[in-house]
Image (cartoon, rainbow, N blue to C red):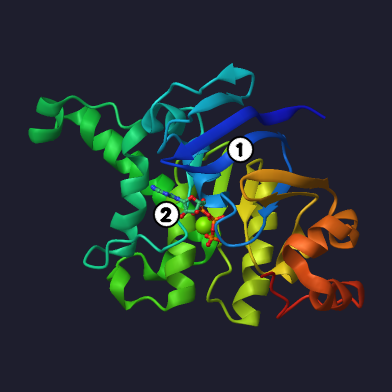
């Protein structure tokens, strides 16, 4: 199986702290890969490094065989990297559709005069962008709310809106930072279905989550971080039985619940 993403020796320091420490990780193309670990383990920092929001202190990031380590975020977005944020980031005063359209600016090619005078090429691009955004809303089940104000959405729908915005540009790699946080069990099940649909449609998914039922249910591959280091990587079954992972993150109670087949309400530290 080929890898869509490879990071090697990836390190990010903040003042005296090493948030990501000499990390090697491979993400198989077409898979669902989870990154887990305690609070402060460096999971969000890793996503910031992959998406280009932060430069690494050292190390390399290879996307589909191309070294993107020095590319700015918008260039990586154009190469197919999209993400959601741990803390929801939507524009409440805008409509649902307008929020999704903000995810498409990297692909727009009209010049400023073409935009100002609404020349044909701009109007055609605008039409295409709306069609693409509506397809993304369809994917997450929010088409009917396209013209509602984003602020009027329920929390669960707002999180789906973020996924729609990330998916609008049809990324190759989707990074989801704690997508199940704050969701009830029914919404979490629906999210798992959505993530599987996204993967089936050809987007590789890399996600961070503390909901262990969700992680174990959905991922083929799990990387466990602790203090910025990879302490384990492998399939979910092996992860939840690994003594170092139980010690650093899961705890014995959670490991026992997972072994007994629990899929909801089981959270890591
Ligand atoms: N911009 C920053 N400046 C300084 N320190 C930072 C910065 N961003 C993160 N850190 C620190 O780096 C470490 C890793 O943080 P990070 O947010 O990546 O953890 P996390 O694994 O996502 O945790 P959580 O599960 O709580 O979201 C923490 O100690 C955090 O305080
Ligand atoms: Mg985080």
Q: Can you tell which mark lies on residue 21?
A: 1
- Closer to us: 36 or 181: 36
From the top left corner, tell me how far across and down residue 77 is, in percent: 44, 34
Q: At 49% across and 56% down in the image, what residue appears?
A: 163
Q: At 40% across and 63% down in the image, what residue appears?
A: 88
Tell me the quarter of the picture where residue 242 sits. Answer: bottom right
Q: Would residue 148 be seen by someone viewing this image from the given angle? A: no
Q: Quadrant of the C terminus?
A: bottom right
Q: Is the residue marked by circle 2 packed among few (<14), some (14-19), or many (20+) residues within 10 Å? A: many
- Left or right: 46, with 215 as reference point: left
Q: At 88% across and 59% down in the image, what residue appears?
A: 243
Mark 2 falls on what kind of element?
helix
Tell me the quarter of the picture where residue 146 sits. Answer: bottom left
Q: Quadrant of the N terminus?
A: top right
In terms of sequence position, does the residue under pointer 2 or pointer 1 come before the other?
1
Q: Would residue 176 be seen by someone viewing this image from the given angle? A: yes
Please give the count of numbered marks on the rendered protein. 2
Above or below, 68 against 73 in this view is: above
Q: Can you tell which mark lies on residue 134?
A: 2
Above or below, 269 against 131 in this view is: below
From the top left corner, tell me how far across and down residue 115 is, in percent: 15, 33
């Amino acid at each position: 199986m080929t890898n869509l993403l490879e990071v090697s020796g990836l390190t990010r320091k903040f003042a005296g702290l090493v948030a990501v420490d000499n990390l090697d990780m491979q993400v198989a193309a077409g898979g669902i890969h989870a990154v887990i670990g305690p609070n402060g383990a460096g999971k969000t920092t890793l996503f910031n490094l992959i998406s280009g929001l932060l430069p690494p202190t050292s190390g390399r990031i290879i996307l589909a065989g191309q070294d993107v380590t020095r590319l700015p975020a918008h260039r990586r977005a154009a190469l197919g990297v999209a993400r959601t944020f741990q803390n929801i980031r939507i524009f409440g005063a805008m409509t649902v559709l307008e929020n999704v359209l903000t995810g498409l600016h990297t692909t727009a090619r009209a010049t400023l005069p073409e935009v100002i005078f609404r020349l044909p090429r701009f109007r055609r691009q605008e039409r295409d962008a709306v069609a693409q955004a509506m397809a993304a809303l369809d994917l997450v089940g929010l088409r009917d709310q396209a013209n509602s104000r984003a602020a009027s959405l329920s929390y669960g729908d707002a999180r789906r809106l973020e996924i729609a915005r990330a998916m609008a540009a049809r990324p190759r790699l989707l990074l989801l930072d704690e997508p199940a946080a704050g969701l009830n069990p029914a919404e979490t099940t629906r999210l798992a279905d959505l993530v599987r649909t996204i993967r089936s449609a050809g987007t590789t998914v890399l996600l961070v989550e503390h909901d262990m039922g969700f992680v174990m249910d959905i991922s083929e591959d799990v990387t466990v971080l602790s203090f910025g280091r990879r302490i384990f990587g492998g399939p979910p079954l092996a992860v939840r039985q690994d003594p170092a992972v139980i010690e650093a993150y899961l705890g014995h109670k959670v490991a026992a619940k997972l072994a007994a087949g629990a899929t909801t309400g089981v959270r890591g530290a």
